[in-house]
């Protein structure tokens, strides 16, 4: 691969002040780079600035490396006190897929991976159901781990999951309709690195058979939501949503069928956004700004360790199209199991259950959560969509 064809992606956030765009573009020009794509967003409510830049080398024979780029950019990052990442787009993220009995999201991700739509390396497939439940599904050479769970073995089973995450150097854990509530302990370890998919009826239709509940109430829209998993059940920062109109002619089975389709595409979009460094967590304010950008070129993304010139927010970058969003798209700041939760969450905690924030200190290639907010262990929450 020549230096000319080697492209990189830079994401950053910092306090919004004059000169950031000029500083970044001038630095890349002076370093011998050519900007291929650039997107930026200034959040006037939080005073934060966000930017994603794709670039490559102009001189194919210069012999410079990714580390050279990082070292030179660190000085500019320090000047503006940026939180930033920089990686070669050819680097792939290692993704672990967790599933239960419903396999539609799992099969969809595997298909998109096989045809090259999702540029990732699948580190493992984990299920609390045996391999036979998936029938003729072709997992190829992907390791499959059957980890059954009961009320008495929950902690042991989750310990095995964490060992797999660590041993396989997994960067992202995807709950592809994994129908188990993760404990607060595992949630904390996976903070910032775990995403989930669920129906968008929350909080109106919680619990079992949500589509049947929706049918009984005569809903006119059904949908799905993908979000980062936090200790607050199904209330993590939202990555993507979509909806579909239904009518009185639709039966509960029709709602389930249409719901499966929405869940598949919403989760696939969310995984792709993260692989392409398009999701940026925006401090603690519920900000969901949308910018339409060209994402036709698939990034091949390992999410590198966060480079921070200041003790700033954890961030990703996200491409958000104009999909309708249900009214549940709000988020708050979530300490990792440390704040007073809802009564329902307290009941879950007392019963040994919990849910997942996302990201993990101590796992190779995974960001340290201790620098999220001026050394606080409090996880960031909402997303700036770039």
Image (tube, rainbow, N blue to C red):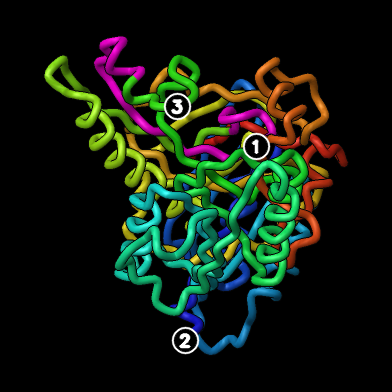
SS type, badge 1: loop
* In this view, the mark in front (2 or 1): 1
The residue pinned by badge 2 equals: 2
Label disc, if present, on residue 295 of the rendered structure:
none
The residue pinned by badge 1 equals: 355
Question: Residue 32 or 252: which is nearer the viewer?
Answer: 252
Question: Residue 34 or 47: which is nearer the viewer?
Answer: 47
Left or right of 297 in this view: 83: right
> Does the magenta run of residues contain 308?
no
Which quadrant holds residue 247? top left
* In this view, the mark in front (3 or 1): 3
Write down the region rendered in magenta.
Answer: 213-236
SS type, badge 2: loop
Mark 1 Cα-neighbour bin, 10 Å: few <14, some 14–19, many ≥20? many
Q: Is residue 25 visible?
A: yes
Counting residues from the start of the chain, the first of labels 3 and 1 encountered is: 3
> Does the magenta run of residues contain 219?
yes
Counting residues from the start of the chain, the first of labels 2 and 1 encountered is: 2
Question: Residue 47 or 128: which is nearer the viewer?
Answer: 128
């Amino acid at each position: 691969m020549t230096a000319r064809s080697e492209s990189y992606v830079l994401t950053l956030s910092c306090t919004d002040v004059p000169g950031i765009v000029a500083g970044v573009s001038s630095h890349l020009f002076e370093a011998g780079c050519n900007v291929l794509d650039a997107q930026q967003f200034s959040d006037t409510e939080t005073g934060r600035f966000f930017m994603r830049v794709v670039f490559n080398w102009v001189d194919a024979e210069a012999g410079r490396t990714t580390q050279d780029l990082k070292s030179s950019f660190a000085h500019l990052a320090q000047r503006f006190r940026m939180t930033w990442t920089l990686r070669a787009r050819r680097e792939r993220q290692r993704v672990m897929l967790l599933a239960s009995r419903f396999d539609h999201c799992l099969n969809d991700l595997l298909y998109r991976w096989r045809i090259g739509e999702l540029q990732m390396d699948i580190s493992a497939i984990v299920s609390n159901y045996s391999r036979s439940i998936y029938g003729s599904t072709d997992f190829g050479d992907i390791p499959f781990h059957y980890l059954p769970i009961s009320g008495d073995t929950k902690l042991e089973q989750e310990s095995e999951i964490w060992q797999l995450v660590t041993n396989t150097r997994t960067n992202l854990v995807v709950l592809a309709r994994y129908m188990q509530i993760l404990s607060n302990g595992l949630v904390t370890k996976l903070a910032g690195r775990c995403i989930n998919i669920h129906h968008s009826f929350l909080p109106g239709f919680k619990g079992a058979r949500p589509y049947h509940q929706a049918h009984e109430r005569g809903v006119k829209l059904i949908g799905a939501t993908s979000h980062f998993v936090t200790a607050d059940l199904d209330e993590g920062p939202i990555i993507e949503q979509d909806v579909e109109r239904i009518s009185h002619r639709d039966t509960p089975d029709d709602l389930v069928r249409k719901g499966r389709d929405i869940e598949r595409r919403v989760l696939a979009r969310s995984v792709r956004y993260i692989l392409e460094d398009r999701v940026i967590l925006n401090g603690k304010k519920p900000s969901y700004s949308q910018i339409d950008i060209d994402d036709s070129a698939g990034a091949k993304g390992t999410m590198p360790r966060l480079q921070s010139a200041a003790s700033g927010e954890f961030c990703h970058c996200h491409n958000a199209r104009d999909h309708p969003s249900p009214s549940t798209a709000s988020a708050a700041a979530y300490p990792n199991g440390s704040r007073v939760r809802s009564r329902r969450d307290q009941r879950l905690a007392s019963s040994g259950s919990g849910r997942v924030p996302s990201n993990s200190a101590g796992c190779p290639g995974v960001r340290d959560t201790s620098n999220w907010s001026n050394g606080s262990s409090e996880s960031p929450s909402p997303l700036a969509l770039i």
